[in-house]
Amino acid sequence: MYLNANNISYAYKKNKPILKNLSISIPDNKVIGLMGDSGSGKSTLCKVISGYIKNYTGTVTLDNNLIETKDFYPIQLIFQHPEKTMNPKWKMHKVLSESWNPPQELMDTFGLKDNWLGRWPNELSGGELQRFSILRALNPKTKFIIADEISTMLDAVTQVQIWDALLDYCKQNKIGILAVSHDKELLEVIADDILLFNEINKL
Amino acid sequence: MENDLLTVQNVSISFTQYVQGLQQHILKVISDLSLSVKEGEVVAILGSSGSGKSLLAHAILGILPENGQCDGTISFKGEVLTQEKKEELRGEHICLIPQSVNFLDPLMKVREQAIGDVKDEEKEKALKHQKEIFEKYGLAEEVGDMYPFELSGGMARKVLLSTALLSDPELVVADEPTPGLDQASVNETINDIKRLAQEGKGVLLITHEIDVALKTADRIAIFYSGYVIEINKAENFNDVNKLLHPYTKSLIEALPRNGFKLTSGVQPLEEVDGCPYFENCPIRSDICQNNKPDLIDHNGIMIRCHNFDKEVN
Ligand SMILES: Nc1ncnc2c1ncn2[C@@H]1O[C@H](COP(=O)(O)OP(=O)(O)OP(=O)(O)O)[C@@H](O)[C@H]1O
Ligand SMILES: Nc1ncnc2c1ncn2[C@@H]1O[C@H](COP(=O)(O)OP(=O)(O)OP(=O)(O)O)[C@@H](O)[C@H]1O
Ligand SMILES: [Mg+2]
Ligand SMILES: [Mg+2]
């Protein structure tokens, strides 16, 4: 399966285009790395592809089919700051089960401890929360993962643990990944190809 | 110590949580923590996510949440800091570059936030300085008129950094100043940190980016699960064999360029009797399970481990 974004253009404010005629293609068996200057529009592109921004021009397709928005969105975005995407009034078991109920085996693979489930989001560290947000995104209906700086806030040991588990799961389940990062050395290890944002954005 | 700017001695931080109804639960997140920063020195803190780095920063600035309790002593230039004293020094003598971009005021344009509270007669100078700093970090002039929600991740971080550089403190506590910044801005940050130290200021630099620590710091402290487990010279981090604690080694070996080596296991969530690294440690022995190692001085390197290799260094 291929995820294609074709000729995407978008502006938050009139006269100030951020994305222009941008196209990108991601196969389900690869990890595509994306690097670029701060403020250039990488996160904006991630939000377009994963359905958070809707009023863009161009198309986002899976094997040339437009995506049904009323069903579960098969392209899942994972952010840099997990705390911003969790309801602070929900305990972690609810945060997770809102998406799905992962099997125990997968919980273990991602190093999720049972007693974390009874905690509130603000009682866990960034690294602990990021494990939840990744597992939450790995719903069986997910076909692609958009990973926007998901390990920048983590220590090097946790970074390896998280990428190791994520890459392994995605390979087995034929899930493609777009990985945005400023860390060239990281992308060289995890990605099959690395794209430069300024080269694909036709501003 | 004589020229210590900041001294942290045997600091512990715990939270009171209410489990069910009135049942209290004390959660200890930092234990027996000691470190110091001298004038003109950069001390970096590296460590596991959730090990208490930000909470230490907040304790120094006196901004822990209400249910947080801080024991031990924190001194600035030899004077023990009370809550009142911390409030007096904050922003002027001691400055925080916060980790969370939530510290930006959502309703205030970023130019105003960057220059902070200044007297009318100093405003012009501050604005000029702000313009220079924004330019240096590649923030366009119109960014000054934006509100925080209009900023990208990296732009927000640059604004937080500018705020601290615009005031003229004696001690800067920088909590993750560089994540998500492009290389040019990371290099600017590195130069600014070095410049602060050259001017005789002290910098406590909390970071996950080992390169930034290596390029700026004199000493690097490693945190794990609320403990300082090692404080070593920055240069020793270029050679894994000169590092003493097994966690420190695994942190360096996990870097992409050093092989991206996987070490399993997470830090304990609750206080344990023995060494906090016991569960994941490759060199543990019986004594480690129930006896907590002290932080000891081994030829000038501080180490908290029963079984480290005494032949090293
Ligand atoms: N909600 C918004 N309203 C107006 N402008 C915005 C908004 N969000 C982002 N922008 C602008 O869009 C541009 C691109 O932002 P984006 O977050 O996509 O950048 P980025 O490439 O992800 O940067 P970084 O590497 O710093 O995260 C920036 O100039 C930013 O100021
Ligand atoms: N208000 C609170 N109540 C209870 N526990 C808390 C509270 N704030 C933080 N903690 C816990 O204290 C520990 C240390 O948190 P801290 O934010 O200092 O970690 P950190 O070392 O800065 O991590 P990171 O590298 O992810 O930023 C974490 O396990 C966290 O879950
Ligand atoms: Mg971004
Ligand atoms: Mg922190």
Image (cartoon, rainbow, N blue to C red):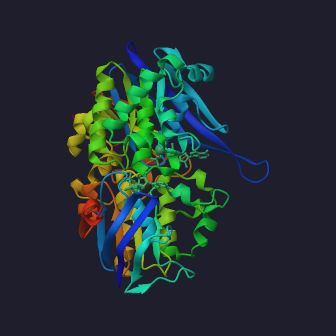
Q: Is residue B292 visible in the rendered structure shown here?
A: no
Residue at image x 59%, y 51%?
A: A123
Which residue sits furthest right? B21
Left or right side of A58 for A23: left
* The N terminus of chain B lies in quadrant: top left
Please state the horizontal and vertical placement of residue B68, each as a whole percent of the image.
63, 37
Please state the horizontal and vertical placement of residue B291, each as a whole percent of the image.
47, 42
Please state the horizontal and vertical placement of residue A61, each as a whole percent of the image.
40, 81
Residue at image x 47%, y 33%?
A: B114
Q: Nearer the viewer, residue B192 or B171?
A: B192
Q: Is residue B236 visible in the rendered structure shown here?
A: yes
Residue A126 in the image: above or below residue A203: above
Number of numbered markers = 0
Which residue sits furthest top? B2
Left or right side of B200 for B228: right
Which residue sits furthest front? A15
Please state the horizontal and vertical placement of residue B122, each as a whole percent of the image.
47, 18
Residue A147 in the image: above or below residue B285: below
Q: Nearer the viewer, residue B32 or B67?
A: B67
